[in-house]
Each structure stands twice: as C-alpha cells, then as structure tokens.
Amino acid sequence: MSSKKRAGAGDDGLAGSGRTPAGPGEARPTGGPLVAALNTTRRFIDRVLAVTCVAIFAALVIVVAWQVISRQVLQSPASWTEESARYVFVILALLGSALVFSERGHIAVELLVNKFPVPAQRIVALAVEGSIIFFAGYVMIYGGFAVAANAWTQNISTMPVSVGQVYLILPVAGALITFFALCHIVGMFAGTEKLVPEIDENNQGI
C-alpha cells in the first residue's frame, strides 16, 4: 500500500509528487513545454484547492461547534447546522479527494505491478488512469450534471441554495480529477512521473 506526502522545502517539488528524480550525473527529464505547462497549471490548481479545502474545513468546524454550543449550552438547537454541516462535508470530501489525486496520494497496491517489466507497468498505469478518466467523466461529470439538473429546483429549507446547486460539486471534482489523470499520463510517457506511486514509509499503517 502506498500514500503520498506533499513535497518539503528544498526537494524541488519531487518528493511526494510521483515524478522521477534524476540519478547522480543524470540529466533530469523535463518533458518539454507541454509537460511544463501542465505542471505549472496543476501546481496553481493545487494551491487553489488547498486554500479552498482549508477554508471549507474551517467553516465545517465553526458550523459543528455552533451546533454543539446551541444544543448543549444555549438549549436552543440551531436547525440549519446539521444540514449545512452535511453538505459542507460532502463538498470538502470531493475537493479533497481531487487534491489528493493530484499528488497521487490515494491508496495503491503496487506489490504485483512492481514485479512487471517497465513496458507492462506502463500498460497497467495507462489502464488505471484510463479507468479513472472514464469514471470521472461518465459518473462524476455526466452523471453529476444529470443529478444536479434533476434536483435544481429542490430547495434546502435551511440554506440559501438548492440541492442541485450543491450537486454541481460532482462535475467540478470530476473535471479536476480528469485533468490530473491526463497530467499523470503525459508525465509518465514523458519520463517526469513514476509509473507506480512511491511508497511513503513514514505513512504506513501499523
């Protein structure tokens, strides 16, 4: 099993990014202008997603804290907090999963794949990313738009938005995941991304 971590200062963004570092005396692959443009765009989206997730998490903490205070201290439960917390958590989970996918931080079982020759690893990596693109495109983008349209007029009594508007987070997250998957595919074939995510020994379950 593997789990990625964000690159630390001084490692030039290679640690935890899934990119292949250059060996001693070996030129670091750049992948050309296309890969550079994709990586620049991905880093910008990552920063925006990280800030957004932190802000949403802070809002979730505030909502849940007020729910507890209003119920246990003021003895007058705020009716809007439970529903708001539920929808905010869903939004946070979807955007957070997109951010983790960008860093190739989701669980991966690479025990068998590591034993394959490089061409076979490339085929498996392409099949995995292709499956992710299909799921994100068909289920999250296409299905998300369909669900949002179906529930667009379904109002949430305690919030100033409709259920359909909240469901728009599905195609948004799907589009982000699709973009990140395409970045991984281009990077793997350009030599700037590892075919198999690295194992983070400091993040292993006990």
Image (cartoon, helix red, strand yellow):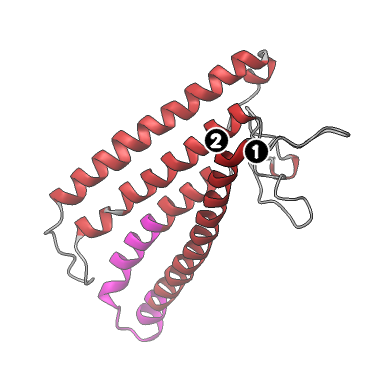
Q: Is residue 75 left or right of residue 195?
A: left
How far apart are labels 2 and 1 at the CA level? 9 Å
For the N terminus, which image quadrant? top right
**Can residue 104 be seen?**
no
Seen from the viewer's position, the closer of residues 151 and 188 is 188
What kind of residue is marked 1? Gly
User: Residue 70's image quarter?
Assistant: bottom left
**Can residue 122 be seen?**
yes
Residue at 62% x, 30% y: name it: 190
Is residue 70 on the magenta stretch?
Answer: yes
Residue 133, compared with residue 85, is above or below; it is above
The residue carrying mark 2 is 184
Magenta highlight range: 67-91
Residue at the left extreme of this rendering = 153
Seen from the viewer's position, the closer of residues 84 and 26 is 26
Seen from the viewer's position, the closer of residues 43 and 67 is 43
Q: Which mark is residue 18?
A: 1
User: Residue 184's image quarter?
Assistant: top right
**Label 2 vs 1, first from the N-terminus:** 1
Mark 1 element type: loop
